[in-house]
Image (cartoon, grey):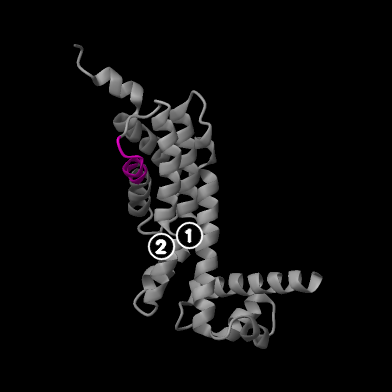
Amino acid sequence: MATSRGRIDKRQAILDGAFTVFARQGYAQACVQEIADEAGVAKPTVYNHLTDKATLFRHAIQAAAQSVLDQRLAALKPLSEPGPDLRGTLEEVGHHLARLHADGRSCALRRLLYGELTHFPDILDIVVESGPHRLSQALADRLARLILTGRLHAANPGQAAEHFLALLIGPLEARSQMGTRQIGDTELQEIARAAAHTFLQAFDAEDASARQPAE
């Protein structure tokens, strides 16, 4: 059991080290020895776990994408039981998602995906399995419950989820200059607050009822 655990830990160290080096150097400039040094293992150990540089790259991207997705899915948890202050909960969730989108690891992952897609077209599968659409699907599930209980007014929870994420990601990409400029937490909070406000202007059930013409 200890040997198996040690092998898993070593593999994870290699994947983490590989992602760090690929993010810093790009695929073409990265070398396996540098990855081994970053991971704290011998170069042959890298090859024992992952057979070549291309395989290492694919697995490192996949592991990083899954880690980023897991964090974002966890950020949605408050929407399972939002309490009476739905706006405040949406702002909290939006702020958490904005922080995750703007952190260095997420930005590095997007740069690697964009930069290496022509050389590794199969990494599109990683985007499908662990990318933004999975987050959108999970958010749609949370919003569907709010629609069923009358908290939100929307015919399509998937579309509502896309709108909320667009209200967050659009300003984040513009203000961060596609991840090249760091955004402070106060600005992230402002973006989340504006996203929640605009979203509820469109989908809040109480506001929608108030806007209905009297019969």
Looking at the image, the residue that sits furthest to the bottom is 44
Instruction: Please give the name of the residue rendered at 54% of the width and 40% of the height, measured from the top-left corner.
Output: 77
Q: Is residue 187 visible?
A: no
Q: Which residues are magenta?
A: 155-163
Q: Is residue 2 left or right of residue 91?
A: right
Image location (x, y in percent) of residue 64 = 53, 65
Q: Quadrant of the N terminus?
A: bottom right
Image location (x, y in percent) of residue 63 = 55, 66
Q: Is residue 213 magenta?
A: no
Q: Main secondary structure of the magenta part?
A: helix
The residue singled out by tag 2 in the image is: 128
Q: Is residue 78 left or right of residue 166?
A: right
User: Which is more foreground, mark 2 or mark 1?
Assistant: 2
Amino acid at the residue labelled 1: Ser
- In this view, the residue in front, 155 or 171, is 155
Q: Secondary structure at mark 1?
A: helix
Q: Is residue 125 visible?
A: yes
Looking at the image, the residue that sits furthest to the top is 215
Residue 163 vs 19, above or below: the answer is above
Q: Secondary structure at mark 2?
A: helix
Q: Is residue 159 magenta?
A: yes
- In this view, the residue in front, 188 or 144, is 144
Q: Is residue 197 left or right of residue 29?
A: left
Amino acid at the residue labelled 2: Val
Instruction: Please give the name of the residue rendered at 19% of the width and 11% of the height, measured from the top-left corner.
Output: 215
Q: Please tell me the numbered disc located at residue 106.
A: 1
- In this view, the residue in front, 109 or 189, is 109
**How dense is the environment of label 2, judged by Cα within 10 Å: few (below 14), some, or many (20 and up)?**
few
> Splitting the image into 4 quarters, where does residue 45 fall?
bottom right
Residue 181 vs 56, above or below: the answer is above
